[in-house]
Image: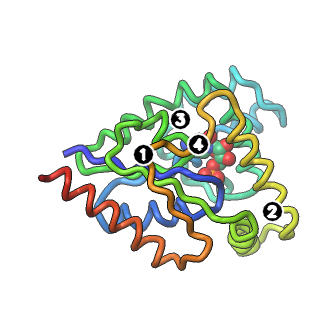
Amino acid sequence: MQFVVAIDGPAAAGKGTIARAVAERFGFAHLDTGLLYRAIGVKALAQGRGVVDEGLAALIARDLTLEELQGDELRGARAARAASKVAAMPEVRTELREFQRRFAAREAGAVLDGRDIGTVICPEAQVKLFVVADDATRARRRLAELTQRGEDTTFEGVLADLQARDARDSQRATSPMRRAEDAHLLDTTELSIDAAVDKATQIIEQALDRAKA
Ligand code: C5P
């Protein structure tokens, strides 16, 4: 049985944490699609000597492999900024569409998290979640992550970065970030990680029961 969980939402709302936890719980494969854009952004910056060219970024996207999504550098703030630039390029998104759909088609089930999974990549997903949290909460969480990585940054800097990225992601012409009409809204502002994962788990269990019935 093919079963897809699509998790979208803005940066640092908790998508990745929820996606990893439910993938493990249900034995589904997990793809953090942000890493695709991060890997392309970092490579395009390096090859373009600091300038990101759309043709070059699309070529990099065409040849991208899962093995290239491993580097620790991809988790940093620089990679996030580069990602959000290449993510606005239609040629890059076209190149990545099939890659993501092939991943989603795995027999054992798949969880994909990103910005356009429920709307564009897997509009037929059995479960769609749109995960949000207020700006200050997201900035606090991301600051803790970046500080732990040893990046020298401030709450104000992280907040400004997140807001700029959200604006670019939701206002771009191609596949903007938005909640699919049939997506469950999950606001994690006041939730612990366990409570957020529990809510997502309940929604997935109900959908699995429906799919098996
Ligand atoms: O989720 P993450 O913060 O790693 O994503 C980095 C950037 O990649 C986002 O700001 C967004 O611009 C882009 N992205 C996207 N579509 C996705 C996943 C990520 O446009 N499905």
- CA–CA distance between discs 2 and 4? 22 Å
Q: Mark 3 near mark 2, Cβ–Cβ under 8 Å?
A: no
Q: Which of 101 and 183 is in front in this view?
A: 183
Residue at the limit of the structure toward the front, as seen here? 181
Q: Which of marks 3 and 4 is in front?
A: 4
Which numbered disc, 3 or 1, marks the residue that appears first in the sequence?
3
The residue under label 2 is which amino acid type? Val
Q: Which of marks 2 and 4 is in front?
A: 4
Name the residue located 83 percent from the left edge and 70 percent from the top edge: 155
> In the figure, residue 30 lies in which quadrant?
bottom left
Q: Residues within 10 Å of mark 2 (few under 14, many from 20)?
A: many
The residue under label 4 is which amino acid type? Arg
- CA–CA distance between discs 3 and 4? 26 Å
Which numbered disc, 2 or 4, marks the residue that appears first in the sequence?
2
- Residue 147 drawn at (x, y percent): 76, 73
Tag 1 residue: 182
Q: Which of marks 3 and 1 is in front?
A: 1
From the viewer's perspective, tell me whether residue 157 is left or right of residue 5: right
Cβ(mark 1) to ligand 1 < 8 Å?
Answer: no
Numbered mark located on residue 158 in the image: 2
> In the figure, residue 148 lies in which quadrant?
bottom right
Secondary element at image label 4:
loop
Q: How crowded is mark 3: few (under 14 residues within 10 Å), some or many (20 or more)?
A: some
- CA–CA distance between discs 3 and 1? 31 Å
Name the residue located 36 percent from the left edge and 35 percent from the top edge: 102
Tag 4 residue: 178
The residue under label 1 is which amino acid type? Asp
Q: How crowded is mark 4: few (under 14 residues within 10 Å), some or many (20 or more)?
A: some
Which numbered disc, 3 or 2, marks the residue that appears first in the sequence?
3
- CA–CA distance between discs 4 and 1? 11 Å
